[in-house]
Each structure stands twice: as structure tokens, then as C-alpha cells.
Image (spheres, rainbow, N blue to C red):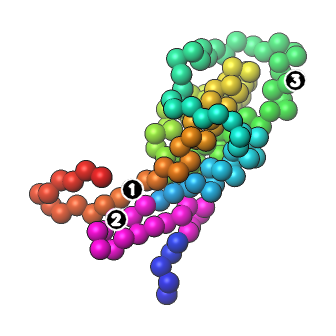
Amino acid sequence: MEETKKILGMEISRDRNTCKLWLSQKNYVLKMLERFYMAEVRPVTTLLACHFKFSQCSNSQEEENEMSRVPYAKAVGSMMYVMVYTRPILAHAVSIVSWFMLNPRRQHWEAIKWVLRYLRGTASLVLAFQRLEIGKPKML
């Protein structure tokens, strides 16, 4: 049998000589950015900036109508998929935006777009694994 190169949308790279393994979801992230019309946005370097102030106040009728057309839950789910498999650094941001899934407001959607901009700039990052010998710690 051949070595597995892709599974569940993750690309797998392996170097048997150095006992290293890399998991990437670059293609999934790029497709996700296209799905939410964020493929050409300017990337950012931080996950959630301090200028986001989240509240759970009730929406105005106009905002509620607008947000009913926004794919908020799909965006959170897509980010969660990336977080679980290759990008654990997203956990805090995904946790925050998922709190507002029942009643999202414009400010919450802006936060999701910010995280997508972060993913735009970091789409090529990989999760790396390396076998360690007992008693010999190594940093990747």
C-alpha cells in the first residue's frame, strides 16, 4: 500500500529519516475563505483584537433581518473544523464567537471576519509532530 497523503481534508507530509510528520489544511482554509467571500481580503496578524467588544443585547429588527442572511453558524463550524485538526491556536477565538450563535449581531460577524482574515494570512501554517527520544528534549 502507498503512504497516505490526504485524509479528511488534511494534507499529510512525512519524513521517515527525521521522524517528522506535518498536517496541513491549507486547501481547506483557502476554499473556506472563498465560500465566505474572504479570499482576497487583507490579512491580519492577530486573532481577536482588543477593539472587539462583545455583548448579548437584543438586536434591532433591522439588524436581526440582516443577520438572518449571514452564514454565521457555517462560518463558526468551518473554523471549528480547522481548529480541531490542525490549528489549536484558534480555540479561544472560536469559543468566543460560538457563544453568540443563537443571537449573533453585526459585531460578532465582524469578529468572525477578523478570524478569517487571520486565517488568510496563516493558511500555510502546519501542525508539526516529531518523535522525541527519552531524555533528549527537542524543539521544532
The number of numbered badges drawn on the structure is 3
Residue at far bottom of view: 1
Left or right of 56 on screen, residue 67:
right
Q: Residue at x 85, y 32 (%)?
A: 69
Q: Which residues are magenta?
A: 6-22
Question: Residue 84, how many percent across, how many down?
Answer: 51, 49
In this rendering, the answer to whether 37 lies above or below 64 is below
Give the number of the disc on residue 20: 2
C-alpha gap between disc 1 and disc 2: 7 Å
- Where is mark 1, residue-wise? 128
Q: Could you say whether the residue bearing mark 2 is in a helix, strand or loop?
A: strand
Q: Residue at x 87, y 23 (%)?
A: 65
Q: Could you say whether the residue bearing mark 3 is in a helix, strand or loop?
A: helix
Left or right of 81 on screen, residue 85:
left
In reply to whether residue 9 is colored magenta, the answer given is: yes
C-alpha gap between disc 3 and disc 2: 50 Å
Left or right of 70 on screen, residue 48:
left
